[in-house]
Amino acid sequence: MKQRSTAKQLAMSGVFIAMAFVLNNFTKIHMPFGGAITLFSMFMIFLPGYCFGWKIGTLAAVAYGLLDLLFGPTIVHPVQVLLDYPLAFGMLGFGSIFSTGRFALQKGYIAGVIGRLIMSTISGAIFFAEYAPVGQNAWVYSLSYQATYLGPEAAVTLILLFIPAVARMIGELKKRANQ
């Protein structure tokens, strides 16, 4: 049976995207060639997938990536735009493949962040290699650059997600979202 999006799922996904957009504006550190450490915006992008499955989550995350592209993008090439916006953010939604089982919330979030890291690293190694220090491999440079802003936000979010009361609250949100 083919899963169809319900109005409730679309509305909640829209709220999560809006929350991610607002949280993205509370940027703590802007990186010189794109990227920033924000307050939990990646988690808000991940939530539709965690609540409703990877298809809806990936669609919502891609939608967020396109929205982010509209407001202050870093653009050097059309393929770079594809990698850095719809594909990189889409990976946060795809991380929801770990939506059941012990520590599913945390494993899914980690998978989504790693997916985003991979897409951004590919983009950086191909399109921003000229900024690597002399003698440094472009792939190593890109991976370390991306990890500089994705890692701290992911770490702080994971600390929060490992607090039992927070994990229970998000589990309850998922349960109620699917009633």
Image (cartoon, helix red, strand yellow):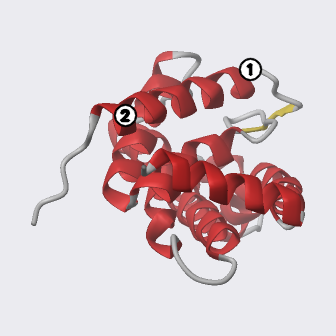
Q: Residue furthest bottom?
A: 102
Q: Is residue 24 left or right of residue 122?
A: right
Earlier along the polypeptide chain: callout 2 or callout 1?
2
What percent of the width, then of the height, locates residue 125? 57, 59
Mark 1 surroundings: few (<14), some (14-19) or many (≥20) residues within 10 A: few
Q: Quadrant of residue 151?
A: bottom right
* Amino acid type at mark 1: Asn
The local crowd at label 2, few if under 14, some if 14 to 19, many if 20 or more residues have their Cα within 10 Å, is: few
Total number of numbered labels?
2
Q: Mark 2: which amino acid?
A: Lys
Residue pictured at 89% horizontal, 62% vertical: 159
Q: Give the side of residue 161 with respect to residue 48, left or right.
A: right
- Check contact, mark 2 vs mark 1: CB within 8 A: no
- Residue for point 49% across, 44% down: 84
Q: Which mark is residue 5?
A: none
Residue 126 visible in the displayed image: no
* Residue 35 locus on image (x, y percent): 69, 38
Q: Which type of secondary structure does the marked residue at label 1 adopt?
A: loop
Which label sits on residue 8? Answer: 2
Tell which tag, 2 or 1, sits nearer the viewer.
Answer: 2
Task: Measure the alpha-carbon separation of dots 2 and 1.
Answer: 26 Å
- Of residues 32 and 94, the one drawn nearer to the viewer in this rendering: 94
Residue 135 image position (x, y, % from top left): 77, 67
**Residue 178, percent from left and from top:** 43, 51
Q: Quadrant of residue 113?
A: bottom right
Q: Residue shown at 76%/42% (left/top)? A: 40
Which residue is disc 1 drawn over?
Answer: 25
Side (left or right) of 175 relative to 79? right
Residue that sits furthest to the top in the current view: 71
Is residue 115 placed above or below 93 in the rendered structure?
below
